[in-house]
Image (cartoon, rainbow, N blue to C red):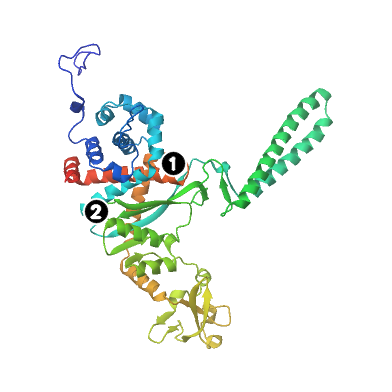
């Protein structure tokens, strides 16, 4: 072992014992976790057990347990059993807890019983970022992503999936019955063995059919006609791949520093009804009067954009093109120019489309415009296969037109959205690993995502300020 760096002997006694503080450098992020939790008013945030009981076995202080969890999520350790092991061997965690080693049940129970308080801690760190002026630019990107729940796809049922599964079982039973008839014509010794095996399979399939009948009765009683057996709050959601049984996580991310301003977990896999609520929440959390939000076309809904406009929030959401005329190569809606002063449209042939009638479409007040000269128009084949081309206009269409004009003048806005919000989702999903959530039911899932968001924001703030400056700001 000559000419190599030598380590200390395992059996060598040390005259002056080293302290744990010697192993944790001044720039170590664990010191930020320690200062952050110590500066919190845990009782005001809603944690249980802040004041110790006068009788019984002494409990762990909630500050210690919170430090364990923040450290764990900051270092991709979400499991309570893994946190128990780390507390026994990890020098940083020993320093953070003062060598306390709670068992995994105690660690898991703390997260389960203090969900609301943990979510308040996440909001408290966002408030700190607001006080540090990190949201002064007031531009956030809103997006949602599907996260897998603790529920296999085979343990989730919709009406269509249940019917398909029943048909598969009936088909399998019929196939096995035909195989039984074939087995009866074979040698007695072979026939007996095959018959017993096939009868066992048929009995198992009939038991599955009875279980599916019971699930069908429960399914009819649910509002959304969907049921999950492992995690009752998980829902089947469409993705670009094969779909996922889980939750829709919504975030609003600051465009300048990529900090998550606010987040939520919903069971609806469609984003169309979530723009105004997320934008309003983001403005409140950022502490600004005026806010600009950008989202992808999955958030486009006229009522949501109007709600943002009425709340003083500037929205950038591209419109989904659903026109059959454009798909068939005919003139699209954009080829008809609206004249607000005359309240009429100008078609590509120069004809005037005047307002003819009003109608109610899904609760929206809509007006219809058309011209009487379509039959003699030379461009009719490129415009409409009907008698005349009719254009529908919402009473608040001017709000959508103004948003489209903003998008035309800011072509980079969608690129900003993509590089802002998808960075946050990619980082958190990488930390989670393949399994995503570890807890069941919506309240506990919200607690878990709050810990992930807190860890993400904490790491971003450390990268922005450094550990020393961030600790100084926390103590101020």
- Residue shown at the point (53%, 78%) measured from the top left: 359
**Callout 1 crowding tier (Cα within 10 Å): few <14, some 14–19, many ≥20:** many
Location of residue 192 in the rendering, given as x and y in whole percent from the top left corner: 80, 26
Location of residue 262 in the rendering, given as x and y in whole percent from the top left corner: 34, 53
**Callout 2 crowding tier (Cα within 10 Å): few <14, some 14–19, many ≥20:** some
Mark 2 / mark 1, whichever is N-terminal = 2
Q: In which quarter of the image is the N terminus?
A: top left
User: Is 12 located above or below residue 222 in the figure?
Assistant: above
- Residue shown at the point (45%, 58%) measured from the top left: 271
Find disc 2 in the rendering and name its residue: 130
Location of residue 203 in the rendering, given as x and y in whole percent from the top left corner: 72, 34
Residue farthest toward the left in the current orientation of the protein = 16
In screen coordinates, is 200 left or right of 27? Answer: right
Q: Residue 437 carries which label?
A: 1
User: Is 273 located above or below residue 37 in the figure?
Assistant: below
Q: What secondary structure is marked by label 2?
A: helix
Residue 470 visible, this angle: yes
Location of residue 333 in the rendering, given as x and y in whole percent from the top left corner: 46, 75
Residue 243 visible, this angle: no
Whole-Å distance between the Cαs marked 2 and 1?
28 Å
Corner quadrant of residue 395:
bottom left
Q: Which of 295 and 113 is in front in this view?
A: 113
């Amino acid at each position: 072992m000559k000419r190599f760096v030598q380590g200390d002997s395992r059996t060598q006694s040390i005259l002056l014992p080293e302290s744990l503080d010697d192993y944790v450098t001044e720039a170590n992020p664990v010191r930020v976790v320690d200062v952050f939790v110590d500066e919190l008013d845990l009782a005001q945030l809603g944690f249980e057990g802040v004041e110790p009981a006068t009788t019984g076995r002494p409990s762990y202080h909630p500050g210690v347990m919170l430090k364990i969890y923040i450290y764990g999520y900051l270092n991709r350790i979400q499991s309570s059993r893994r946190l128990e092991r780390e507390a026994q061997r990890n020098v940083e965690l020993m320093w953070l807890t003062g060598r306390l080693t709670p068992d995994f049940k105690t660690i898991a129970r703390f997260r389960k019983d203090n969900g609301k308080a943990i979510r308040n801690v996440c909001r408290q760190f966002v408030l700190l970022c607001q006080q540090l002026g990190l949201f002064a630019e007031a531009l956030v990107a809103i997006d949602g992503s599907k996260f897998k729940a603790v529920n296999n796809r085979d343990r989730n049922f919709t009406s269509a999936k249940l019917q398909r599964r029943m048909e598969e079982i009936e088909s399998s039973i019929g196939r096995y019955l035909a195989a039984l008839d074939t087995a009866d014509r074979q040698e007695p010794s072979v026939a007996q063995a095959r018959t017993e095996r096939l009868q066992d399979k048929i009995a198992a399939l009939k038991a599955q059919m009875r279980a599916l009948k019971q699930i069908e009765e429960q399914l009819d009683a649910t509002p959304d006609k969907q049921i999950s057996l492992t995690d009752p709050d998980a829902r089947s959601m469409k993705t670009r791949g094969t779909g996922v049984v889980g939750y829709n996580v919504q975030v609003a991310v600051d465009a300048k520093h990529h900090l998550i301003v606010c987040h939520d977990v919903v069971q609806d896999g469609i984003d169309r009804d979530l723009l105004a609520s997320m934008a309003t929440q983001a403005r409140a959390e950022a502490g600004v009067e005026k806010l600009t939000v950008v989202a992808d076309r999955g958030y486009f809904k006229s009522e949501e954009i109007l709600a943002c406009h009425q709340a003083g929030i500037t929205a950038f959401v591209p419109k989904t093109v659903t026109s059959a005329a454009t798909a068939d190569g005919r003139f699209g809606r954009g080829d008809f120019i609206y004249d607000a002063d005359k309240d009429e449209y100008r078609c590509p042939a120069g004809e005037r489309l005047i307002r003819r009638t009003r109608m109610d479409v899904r609760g929206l007040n809509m007006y219809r415009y058309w011209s009487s000269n379509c039959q003699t128009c030379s461009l009719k084949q490129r415009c409409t296969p009907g008698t005349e081309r009719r254009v529908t206009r919402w009473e608040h269409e001017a709000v959508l037109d103004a948003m489209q004009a903003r998008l035309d003048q800011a072509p980079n806005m969608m690129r900003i959205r993509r590089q802002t919000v998808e960075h946050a989702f990619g980082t958190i999903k990488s930390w989670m690993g393949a399994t995503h959530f570890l807890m069941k039911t919506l309240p506990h899932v919200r607690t878990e995502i709050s810990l992930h968001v807190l860890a993400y924001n904490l790491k971003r703030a450390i990268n922005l300020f450094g550990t020393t400056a961030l600790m100084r700001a926390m103590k101020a």
